[in-house]
Image (cartoon, rainbow, N blue to C red):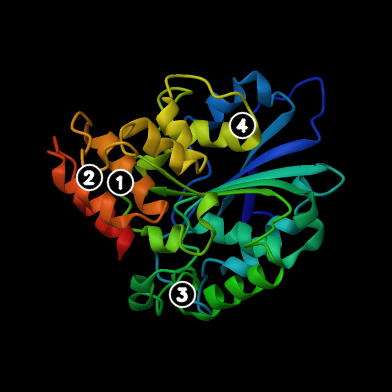
Amino acid sequence: MSKTVEFINFRPASTAKNKTAIVFVHGFTGDVEKTWRRIPEFLRNDPSLNEWDLLGVGYQSNRRFDLTGLWSSDARLEEIANMVHARPELSAGTYTRLAFVAHSMGGLVVQQALVSYEDLRNRTSHVVLFGTPSGGLRKARFASFWKRQIKNMEAGGPFITALRKKWTLLRLDTSPPFAFIVVAGETDQFVPPESSLGCFPQPVGSVIPGNHLTMLDADSPGAPCVQIILQTLGGSPQGALSAAKVAIETGEFGDIVRRLWPNRDTDPNRLPTKLDDYGAMQLAIALERTGDSAAALAVLKSHKPEGTDVLGVLAGRLK
């Protein structure tokens, strides 16, 4: 069991023992270090997070066929969640407060652990999920026969159905005891927005640039994936993150509309004409999230894209 789940420390040991920790959990076929790339480095260097340890959780997940009863198989998500909870690295005696940052299937592991263990739920203060298939994946049913972890991700399957039921019964969808943010990549086709965002109230959903993997790319502390973690944890945003990006990432969609379409109230028929591809997508997403899909489509249809399939991005969100 000790080899099934491993922990690495992203912050060098200090003289003061922290009682709070940020715990990173990777996804399907992910890696405890490679998944997060430079994100832990930038968080480690932020003085507002000096009292947080930075831990990475690793577990076995590969593309090989499961051969249960013959040789070996990767653990089911319930088993991984159980082992994460049981390990002394995250015990109440070690940390009084935990923040989970998870990618893809790792977000399902975190959710399963939270609905299963009240003590862990009570010690959790923040949860940030990047590209997590919380509503399941329809495509998973075609490969579920050869991989138990893929079967766990099947839309309408027993794991996803039970998880969503428990999450609702515990009122974690309406009044979670922790700060909760779910993040989608603008061009993520592996986990579509209806799965990563659709299970939760709109205010907790955020959209950042990138696909399922590149949404975690960070070459500076100003990268959206870094900034959204800092903002959720209460750290001071730093780096070249525009006010517009901050607004959409924290759910202030009305503010993003006012910033990018300032004359909308006085002249609603005059669409903005000086937006780049990124700005057009952000405005369209903000309009759509505030319930004005017609205006969102009008903005995208009037926009002359420089390269991004802006209509395709919004179409993916409206499926």
Residue bearing mark 3: 151
Residue under pointer 1: 284
Mark 1, other Cα within 10 Å: few <14 / some 14–19 / many ≥20: many
Q: Which comes sooner in the sequence, label 1 or label 4?
A: 4
* Residue ID at (73%, 44%): 98
**Amino acid type of the residue tagged 3 in the rendering:** Lys
The residue drawn where x is 30% and y is 33% is 263
The numbered dot on residue 178 is none
User: Disc 1 residue type?
Assistant: Ala
Q: Nearer the viewer, mark 2 or mark 3?
A: 2
At label 2, the amino acid type is Val
Q: Are marks 2 and 1 in contact (CB under 8 Å)?
A: yes
The residue that disc 4 covers is 10
State the residue position of label 2.
299
Residues at badges 1 and 4 in contact (C-beta under 8 Å)?
A: no
| Mark 3: secondary structure | helix
Mark closer to the chain start, 2 or 1? 1
